[in-house]
């Protein structure tokens, strides 16, 4: 488990999983939390139960069917329903918001009083289309953010369309891209793009894990690296 390094309100808990200490095998070794990736449903169910125990969660996490949208849903109680969204927001103690990733950026949010929390899935499409803005709009009071493990800039190759998706909204976004001379592509910094969007909506209290999913095959699943692979997850809840 990864315990985010940020000054959380005392009544808020946040954790992020690695791929260790699970029961999945092969390409999903070992703590795969994704039901949708081709792994054994029995193995994933056991892994999900283990993460509840490892992190001492108050309830079963609320999972999302993530589609790179900007949909952020309020959650009022624990549920086993898989919600069609890329962000979850709650004010209810004991509701565990979960976000799965395998290169995309997991974003955990809380207000400084610890009365509101959110978990957000941010790939480049979600970031470009405004998932951060949608999530922050739910909060009252000052917002704190943790940016979790994601693909690092050196490994994240994109085309001109991705650069244009950001720079047409904010010309300063060009700072998050570096040209790759050998193939005409760009290296994109997901974390920097997220920080830029957070700054635009007035969120200055941002902590960064600094962990790259692509380069650390021991601890993280990576879709760009492996293709068929599992999913880690990040969680946040009000105690």
Image: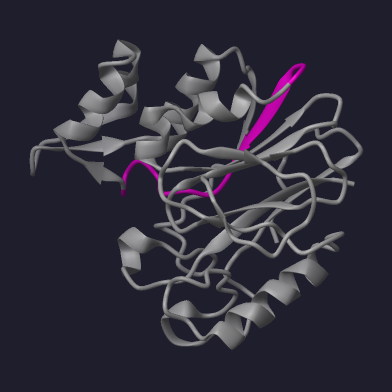
Quick check: can you spot residue 21? no
Residue at 87% x, 59% y is 58
Compared to 151, does 113 lie above or below? Answer: above
Q: Image quarter for residue 232? A: bottom right
Q: Work out whether residue 195 or residue 66 is closer to the camera in this orientation and state it.
A: 66
Residue at 44% x, 48% y is 104
Residue at 68% x, 82% y is 46
Compared to 190, does 152 lie above or below? Answer: below
The magenta region covers 140-155
Q: Is residue 116 magenta?
A: no
Compared to 192, does 17 lie above or below? Answer: below
How far across and how far down the image is residue 188, in percent? Answer: 31, 36
Magenta highlight: main SS: loop
Say left or right for 111 vs 214.
right
How far across and how far down the image is residue 30, in percent? Answer: 56, 79
Q: Image quarter for residue 167? A: top left
How far across and how far down the image is residue 169, in percent? Answer: 32, 15
Say left or right for 35 vs 111.
left
Q: Is residue 154 magenta?
A: yes
Residue at 45% x, 58% y is 102
Q: Work out whether residue 129 or residue 51 is closer to the camera in this orientation and state it.
A: 129
Say left or right for 55 vs 73.
right
> Which of the image's four quarters has the N terminus?
bottom right
Q: How is the image coloured?
A: one colour
- How many numbered marks have been drawn onto this rendered protein structure? 0
Q: Work out whether residue 201 or residue 20 is closer to the camera in this orientation and state it.
A: 201
How far across and how far down the image is residue 23, in percent? Answer: 61, 85
Say left or right for 39 vs 44.
left
Quick check: can you spot residue 107? yes
């Amino acid at each position: 488990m990864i315990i985010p390094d940020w000054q959380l309100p005392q009544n808020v808990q946040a954790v992020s999983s690695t791929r260790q200490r699970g029961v999945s095998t092969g390409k999903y070794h070992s703590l795969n939390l994704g039901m949708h990736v081709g792994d054994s449903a029995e193995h994933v169910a056991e892994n999900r139960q283990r993460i509840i125990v490892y992190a001492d969660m108050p309830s079963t996490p609320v999972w999302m069917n993530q589609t790179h949208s900007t949909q952020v849903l309020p959650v009022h109680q624990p549920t086993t329903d898989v919600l069609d969204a890329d962000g979850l927001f709650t004010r209810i103690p004991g509701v565990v918001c979960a976000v799965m990733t395998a290169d995309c950026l997991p974003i955990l949010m809380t207000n400084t009083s610890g009365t509101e929390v959110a978990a957000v899935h941010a790939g480049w499409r979600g970031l470009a289309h405004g998932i951060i803005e949608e999530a922050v709009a739910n909060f009252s009071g000052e917002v704190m953010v943790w940016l979790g493990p994601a693909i690092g800039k050196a490994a994240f190759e994109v085309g001109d369309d991705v650069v244009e998706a950001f720079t047409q909204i904010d010309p300063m976004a060009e700072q998050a891209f570096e040209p790759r001379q050998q193939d005409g592509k760009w290296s994109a910094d997901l974390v920097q793009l997220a920080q830029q969007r957070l700054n635009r909506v007035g969120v200055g209290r941002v902590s960064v894990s600094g962990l790259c999913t692509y380069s650390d095959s021991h601890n993280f699943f990576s879709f760009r690296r492996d293709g068929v692979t599992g999913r880690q997850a990040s969680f946040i809840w009000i105690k």
